[in-house]
Amino acid sequence: MAEVVTWTSGGAIVGRFEVTRRGFLTGGLALAGTAVLGATVGAGTAWAFDGPPITDCAGWGARPNSAVVPIWNQRPVKILVHHTATPNVTDYSQGAAFALARSIQNFHMDTRGWLDTGQHFTISRGGDVMEGRHRSLEVLRIGQRQVEGAHCTGQNIVSVGIENEGTYIDTDPTDALWTSLRTTCAYICSQYGIAPTELYGHRDFKNTACPGDRLYGMLPRLRREVAGLLGKNVEGGATQKASWPLLRPGDVGVDVQAAQYLLRDHGMTEVVPHGRYDAATADAVVAFEQATGAEDVGMLGGETWPVLARTVRSSERSEAGKAVETLAARRNAESVPDVVTRPDWQRLLGTGGSPADTSVDPVGPPR
């Protein structure tokens, strides 16, 4: 059975493709100034997929990069999904999309001090897909090397970063954006040989709400649909990746209480383990993040949990042991291993799943 995928720009249909069971696209489009990606397949891939039309940097009026864009002689192994945290606009025109790309580049270069846009690709709410950092599209077509990004510390040379226009804390992305996101991910996977299950959110690696609670919650669906477009069969559990809960000021519950015990375990004895993410807890989280070199935003996410939740014996009389005991009481039907490691913490926190790719790139300042 085939699926019809339609691309629009400014409300007009510019392409209609039929996705076959084998994952190939057939059809055509007519969109001046936009690159249509061919089915050049990176070495070692088992499937081919033509991507959506992608406008390169020249097409949306990018400034020149301020320094040479580093290109690594290796392929990325995952895709990171972001949201731009900008208004959920209703202007879905291509002109609005290009203006967004320019504003992001200006912010990244003029305020962040980076050499270019940080992410590799940007998708507008109208579904327009644009190259972000210079040379990202060129290198993707070849499928052998990786443009160094600046979208997530520790992930900039092992992942492709995709920014999605809007804020998706309590709102779903538009259908046009979603269609472009999944077809873009499928093309990136086909070019680099990335497994369709290796799609992550920014918060999996940093202390951030990005890409928003709603879009982050849609990632299992994204993995499943990308796999379907590529004609790949994945087990249902494989689309749910092991992660860490995102805790924020105002949250309450057992997860917060366990985090408070763990903060005390690391010497922050001023924290009271009452299960409320209050100001004192937020201050302690910031202090811990500063001490460990993490992003100190007062949220407890994917960057800090792996450091905070140390390996511990479940029977030991320590604050970390109390954290295990607190979480285990909630899941009283499950046994707790004698030695609790990261996967066990994630299972006790209710965020277990298939193993996540924890590979990181050399630590360095974003450029």
Image (cartoon, grey):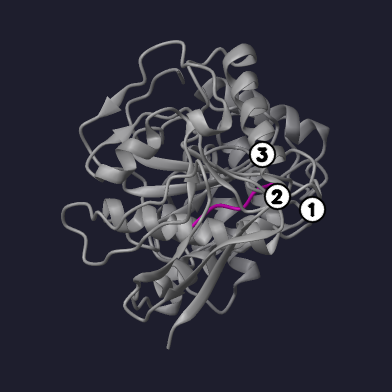
Please determine whether, in this image, residue 19 is positioned above or below residue 352. Answer: below
Residue 244 highlighted magenta (yes or no): yes
**Which amino acid type is marked by label 1?**
Val
Between marks 3 and 1, how big is the CA–CA gap?
A: 28 Å
Question: Does residue 364 appear left or right of residue 15 in this picture?
Answer: left
Amino acid type, callout 3: Thr
Boundaries of the magenta span: 243-247
- Helix, strand or loop status at disc 2: helix
Q: Using the rendered view, name the quadrant where residue 332 is placed.
A: bottom right
Q: For residue 252, which numbered disc appears in the image?
A: 1
Give yes or no for contact between labels 2 and 3 (Cβ–Cβ under 8 Å): no
Question: Which residue position holds label 3?
Answer: 84
Question: Which is nearer the N-term, disc 2 or disc 3?
Answer: 3
Q: Residue at x 33, y 37 (%)?
A: 138
Q: Which mark is residue 102?
A: none
Please state which of residues 216 and 225 is positioned toward the viewer in this rendering. Answer: 225
Q: Mark 2 points at which residue?
A: 256
Crowd around label 3: few <14 · some 14–19 · many ≥20 (10 Å): many
Q: Residue 288 placed where, x, y %?
A: 60, 27
Q: Please identify the dominant SS of the magenta region.
A: loop
Q: Answer few, some or many: residues within 10 Å of disc 2's Cα (few below 14, many 20 plus, some between 14 and 19).
A: many
Question: Which residue is depicted at the point 65% across and 69% down?
Answer: 330
- Of all residues, the one furthest to the bottom in this rendering is 1
- Is any atom of residue 269 visible in this view? no
Question: In the drawing, does residue 148 fall left or right of residue 30?
Answer: left
Question: Dividing the image into 4 quarters, which one contains the C terminus?
Answer: top left
In the image: residue 351, left or right of residue 354 = right
